[in-house]
Amino acid sequence: MKASFMVANENIPEGSRVTGLTGRLQETLRKLSSIGFKKYELMIDDPEKVDIERIKHYNDSFGLDMIFLCSGEMAGIAGLSLNNIDENERKKAIEKFLKAIEVANEFGVNINIGRLRGTIWEDGKEESLKRLAKSLEIVDEFIDSESMRVEVLIEPLRKDICPLLNGCEETVAFIEKNNLRNFKILLDSDHLNKESDPEFIRRDTNWIGHVHLADTAHEPLGRGEINFNEFMDLLLRSGYEGEFSVEVFCGEEQYKTLKESYEYLKKYSNSKETDNE
């Protein structure tokens, strides 16, 4: 099992209620490595505050690989929306996301769209989805024009978190309808649509580019109601061979949560380590 842990870029204040480790990157990455993780996912709120060369230096120093870029706090902290009804705000979100794609390309990783896609605005769901599609067409064209090896993964979310694109089937249908060439989906255990997603996963894991692991309400693994034996069995038996990232609220004792997560994941590994070489 290829497992990593979410780490917030250090411009996000230490102790912020975000789903990952917070604080100085030198410290969080050193601790991550010392506990046993070899990989991590970087959470950002502003791509222009990512110090690419310094992070690459830390990766070399601690024997780590960044395997994914998370855009969650571009919506949560920065308040951006790719389908904002305000044209100027929408343009701002698109420009920032293109910057984030450039960061992802520098690290050779993919990036997600979760809450960043936006919501249903006052002109209704259909128009809100049309604006989102137009924004993502710009993203698609940018990736192609710059010959980037970046895929954008749309994350199906529960309706209480986001009213748009709430299951794998619906999200893939949206991607196909709008001929988005550089897009797949990201699966999150806490956002799984139990009625429709399992059958989709059994049928076609090729659409799944990355997986987030979180318990109920993104609590640490084992503290909620999610049956990870069933979830992991579903994915692995269906042929998923990609990366996993733990994305949970860590609380005040974040390194205790980090260590507990590493130990929890050992049961799903075929080796003595949390990830496979």
Image (spheres, grey):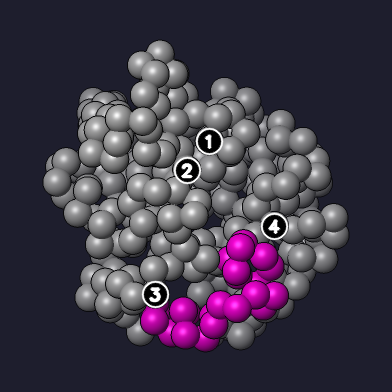
How far apart are the two marked residues, 1 and 2, measured between alpha carbons? Answer: 6 Å
For marks 2 and 4, the one nearer the N-term is 2
According to the picture, the residue beneath numbered tag 3 turns out to be 194
Identify the residue at horizontal 57%, vertical 51% (top origin).
41
Residue 215, given in percent of the width and then of the height, sits at: 60, 70
The amino acid marked with disc number 3 is: Lys
Residue 217 on image: x %, y %: 61, 63
The three-letter code of the residue at mark 4 reads Phe
Which is more N-terminal, label 3 or label 1? 1
Per the model, the C-alpha gap separating discs 3 and 4 is 23 Å
Q: Is residue 106 above or below residue 156?
A: above
Residue 135 to residue 126: above or below: above
Q: Alpha carbon of mark 1 to alpha carbon of mark 3: how far?
A: 26 Å
> Residues under labels 2 and 4: Cα distance?
17 Å
Residue named by callout 2: 115
Q: Nearer the viewer, residue 195 or 206?
A: 195
